Amino acid sequence: MARLQDEQLLEEALVLMRNNLSEPLRTGELAEYLNISVKKLERIFFRFKAVLPARYYRELRLQRARALLFETALTIEEVGLQCGFRSASHFSRSFRETYGRSPRAERMLGERAEVAHRYCFRPVNSDYLRVELCV
């Protein structure tokens, strides 16, 4: 019974987080919306996600930012702001800590991968490959 209630509270917290990526809620605000203590919310997250709510929220925002880098032409600063980071430098620092490269490098990597997927490498013989545009 308690496990089911905790799973339900976790799901409600996740919905709140997903719906508030551009203006993230503090852990205390999340707990208040759920009508539970901060400690209880932290225990629930640690039990089911093995991280604290703030860490999970940050990762969720960075995942969204990564998708926006690939899917939109928004500037790095605009992506950061849409994902709740107060400045481009704060966003870039957090992104680099998580993904090991800057948002700009990530975007360029995605663009190169997209271009590479358009081309096929077909063997002509054992020594040569032919590069063709894939259709």
Image (cartoon, helix red, strand yellow):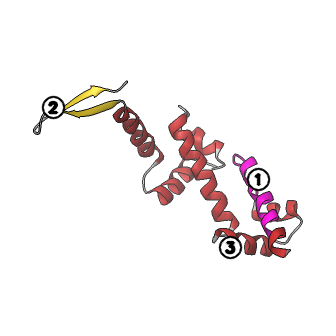
Q: Is residue 7 visible?
A: yes
Please give the residue where the numbered disc 3 appears in the rendered image: 46
Label 3 close to label 1 by CB (< 8 Å): no
In the image, what residue occupies the spot 54% across and 35% down? 71
Please give the residue where the numbered disc 1 appears in the rendered image: 15
Judged from the image, the secondary structure of the residue bearing numbered disc 2 is loop
Judged from the image, the secondary structure of the residue bearing numbered disc 1 is helix
**Residue 34 image offset from top left, x and y in percent:** 86, 62
Label 3 amino acid?
Phe
Q: Which mark is residue 5?
A: none
Q: Earlier in the sequence, mark 3 or mark 1?
A: 1
The outermost residue toward the front is 125
102 left or right of 91 in image: left
**Residue 30 image offset from top left, x and y in percent:** 80, 61
Q: Is residue 20 visible?
A: no
- Say which of 135 and 101 sits in front: 135
